[in-house]
Amino acid sequence: MIELPLTNVRELMRGTTFFRTSHGALEPLRLPEWTNSQHADSAMARVADQSAGIFLDFLTAASVLELDALLVRTLPLEAADSARPAVFEVTVDGEPTDRVVSTGGTRVRARSADDIDRSSHDPFISIRFTLGPATGAERRVQLWLPHTANVTILALRSDGTVTAARPETATKWIHYGSSISHSADADGPLGTWPTVAARQLGWQLTNMGFGGQAMLDQFVARTIRDLPADVITLKVGINPLNADALRVRTFGPAVHGFLDTIRDGHPETRIVLISPIACPAHEHIPGPTVLSAGAQFVGTPDRGDRPGVLTLELERDILQRLVAQRNDASLLFLDGRSLFAEADAAHLYDGLHPDAAGYKLIGDRFAELFSSF
């Protein structure tokens, strides 16, 4: 087996340009490290360090790959140790070829943003992937890292020479959003809706879907501002409502500020502002969002003591009017219900998040809508 130097492994990485390197290890990140000091709490770092949309892209005639890594999985507080496994997937010339599911690694459970139960379980994993019989001809291989786990690569080995695939000339797409864009309940990294769409469209995706953390933070806007992009999509609204973090008075100005910062680096780039998808629990009921005894997320009805609370109906109206007010020919509005309508609500297994089939539905519809974009 041939082991690649980590500097070469870094050259294979797609979906991110941010890394943490130390002591012979390579950890891909979705936000640069300078943003850490501006996080409100540890929750943002946990989701931003997960590998949604990140993969290795290379040419090889090899039939086998081996990966040594450190793995950190974030689990729901009461979930079993085997819950939310880390799924690695491999495609060869675009076709899914191998899939490895790991319940190993360190397990992290959060009682609150900064009350963390971190298991002492050994973080080290070693995984072997099969690429199909060697034919002597080079094939394009993509190794997709788990979208719900943090992966630190220690070694990558193969039974053949590996070289970075030629850089893509495809449309560079940055997508920002909430847990729905992060797609934690997809059945693997290929099943997140942005990845489903990107693979159909042939776009290069940078997925900035952060579970629970799409709060219009300026450090994210500045990160997007400084990255190359041909298309930027911003799916906003559900997290400020979930946390009751913004009101009618502050939501619109926060979106304006987020757009202004991005426009500083992308004055003419096409930006699509996407409103929340259908969610019956919040169409007319504000947050904060709570989990009911029936394991369904529900809103908190307003009794007149919280002026200016947001609902999805209000947010869509604010976002649509905001786009019209800005008079920006390269800024478009998309109603999120065109991706996931109230008629699709049976896919909201907990009243808020789509199931795996729901994510596939969103990705398919996005690809269809943007096929001639």
Image (tube, grey):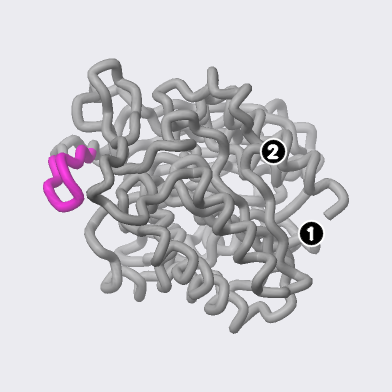
Q: Quadrant of the C terminus?
A: bottom right
Find disc 1 in the rendering and name its residue.
170
Disc 1 vs disc 2: Cβ atoms closer than 8 Å?
no
Residue sitting at x 63%, y 30%: 341
Give the residues in magenta. 108-118
Closest to the observer: 163 or 331? Answer: 331
* SS for dot 1: loop
Tell me the kind of residue under disc 2.
Ser
Residue sitting at x 71%, y 36%: 92
Residue 13 visible in image: no
- Looking at the rendered structure, which numbered label has been put on residue 64? none
Q: Quadrant of residue 142?
A: top right
Residue 317 image offset from top left, x and y in percent = 58, 53
Residue 301 image offset from top left, x and y in percent = 31, 36
Q: Alpha-carbon distance for marks 1 and 2?
A: 25 Å
- Looking at the rendered structure, which numbered label has been put on residue 338? 2
Per the picture, the main secondary structure of the magenta-coloured stretch is strand
Q: Quadrant of residue 277?
A: top right
Closest to the observer: 275 or 91? Answer: 275
Tell me the kind of residue under disc 1.
Ala
Is 271 located above or below residue 265 in the figure?
above
